[in-house]
Amino acid sequence: MTISQDSSAGPLTVVILAAGMGTRMKSETPKVLHRVLGEPLIEHVLRSAQPLEAQKTVVVVGHGREQVIAQLAGTYPQVETVIQEVQNGTGHAVAVTLEHLGETPDGAVLVLAGDAPLITVGDLHDLVAAQAGVGAAVLTAHLDSPDGYGRIVRDSQGNLEAIVEHADATAAQLALTEVNSGVYVFDAQLLAQALSRVGTSNAQGEQYLTDVIGILREDGHTVRAVVTHAQNILGVNDRQQLSHVGRILRDRIVAKWQLSGVTIVDPQTTWIEAQVVIEPDATILPNVTLSGATSIATGVTIGPDCSITDTRIDREAHIVRTTASGAVIGAHATVGPYTYLRPGTVLGVGAKAGGFVEMKNATLGDDAKVPHLSYVGDASIGEGTNIGAATIFVNYDGVDKHFTHVGKHVRIGSDTMLVAPVTVGDGAYTAAGSVITEDVPAGAIGVARSRQRNIIDWVLRRRPGSTSAQAAVANSSSNNHSNEGSST
Ligand code: UD1
Ligand code: CA
């Protein structure tokens, strides 16, 4: 469905304020680059604004600008940045932006705060719609503890009159619980005119964007207020608030997937990043983190205790206690527990990467199995092959990585070292404990270990009186006794 915002309200310019210092974060990282659910705060704001299809999106940067500019160049290259050299207030930040744009843009300007990541697309659509045909619209909310926020002052008819900052408010105004979210839509021309009249005679000596609202009202323009949920306007000022908004985002995403048909057993320990896609009838057990471009097909069970990043999991696969990154897990495959799948791992249909197995840049064919305690790096393993416990693919000679090919229906014996580059042909075997340095032809068995020799009574001679020697003596005499009664 397309929302017909463009035809009704005209073109939109989005301005995101992100020049502030974020002192209370106590961080070398600019506040808007602190991450929740894997993404910088400002990118959550950008995601919410994206469906509005603004003609232009501008981020105002100041403190830590190099880092913010570099981050956005990678993730949102179409977004412009404008530098506010000195942070003279929110009104100043928007004035600097309009100057940067040159001509005042047509249509409306949506102003957002880069540190308030819980704003929803719905809030923004409502606000844009409310501004159509009037001077401005402000997003507000009622807060139990409005401390620090600008208060919404209404006249006796309930019409919005002005916004008064906490530091400048009278005792009566401080008692008001409806606050300014810091999100507004303005008619662009009226905004530009009003900004030129905003002064700095206030408690903080700054140009307040909030003063634009009072100026528009004095000039007889209508300003609408759109009231939203208190939660949606929360901003981040310190790291407690950072984790608080993170939990809210987590709960929202979990709820969305639950309502779409995914079983999520323990929402509080399930962290699903925004880009992840999950089909109905997948089941997610406690303590699971799904990150990046991960996709999970129907019938999959994942967890407990998994961290999955940039990984595709096909239908009916079963993953337990696993860390996976950049992997593909085929349908009906089983993985875990205590398994580490690194980039380039591809598991075929019905394949198994079992307990304490690490894989990297390796393909495991359909129904092939690496059941226990193995390292598989830089390898292809054919369908139906079984890799014995504690097999190591020796892929690194200290300088270069080398590749190992293992054919179909191969039986690699336990504790085999496959020293790459090496090839084991279809249907071949290797003997347990072998160090395979040469190719094994199809159908052959590779045996590469020294023959065993037993030195009889070594313990009795070299460790006399030890518990081992005593056990050996007791064993031989009991064998002698049983032999006495035996007729064989
Ligand atoms: C602002 C509002 C207040 C509202 C609150 C909501 C003003 C004067 N007050 O107050 O009514 O309740 O937001 O959170 O606008 N910024 C710049 N350049 C500047 C100053 C700020 O880019 O010169 C950015 C900050 O980085 C931040 C945003 O603007 O992202 C808000 O600034 P902040 O100083 O946090 O405003 P508040 O005092 O919280
Ligand atoms: Ca301030």
Image (cartoon, grey):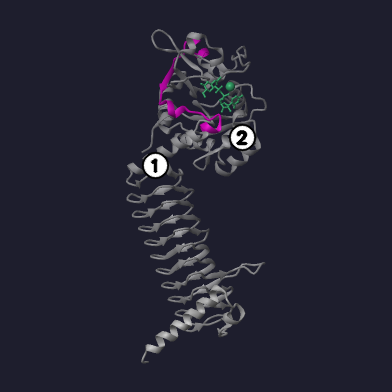
User: What is the x, y in percent for residue 354?
Assistant: 44, 63
Which SS class for mark 2?
A: loop
Within-10-Å neighbours for mark 2: few <14, some 14–19, many 20+: many
Location of mark 1 (residue) = 267
- Badge 1: residue crowd in 10 Å (few <14, some 14–19, many ≥20): many
**Magenta part of the protein: which range?**
214-241
Is residue 233 covered in magenta? yes
Badge nearest the viewer, 1 or 2: 1
For the C terminus, which image quadrant? bottom left
| Relative horizontal placement of residue 317, taking residue 97 as reference (left or right) | left
Which is nearer the eye, 309 or 214?
Answer: 309
Q: Is residue 144 visible?
A: yes
Residue 332 highlighted magenta (yes or no): no
C-alpha gap between disc 1 and disc 2: 30 Å
Q: Residue at x 45, y 37 (%)?
A: 247
| Residue at figure coordinates x 61%, y 16% from the top left | 204
Whole-percent x and y of residue 55? 51, 34
Q: Quadrant of ligand 1?
A: top right
Q: Give the answer, above or below, for where 350 lies relative to 479.
A: above
Give the residue type that dot 1 points to. Answer: Pro
Q: Which mark is residue 483?
A: none
Which residue in the protein does label 2 denote? 30
User: Which residue type does callout 2 highlight?
Assistant: Pro
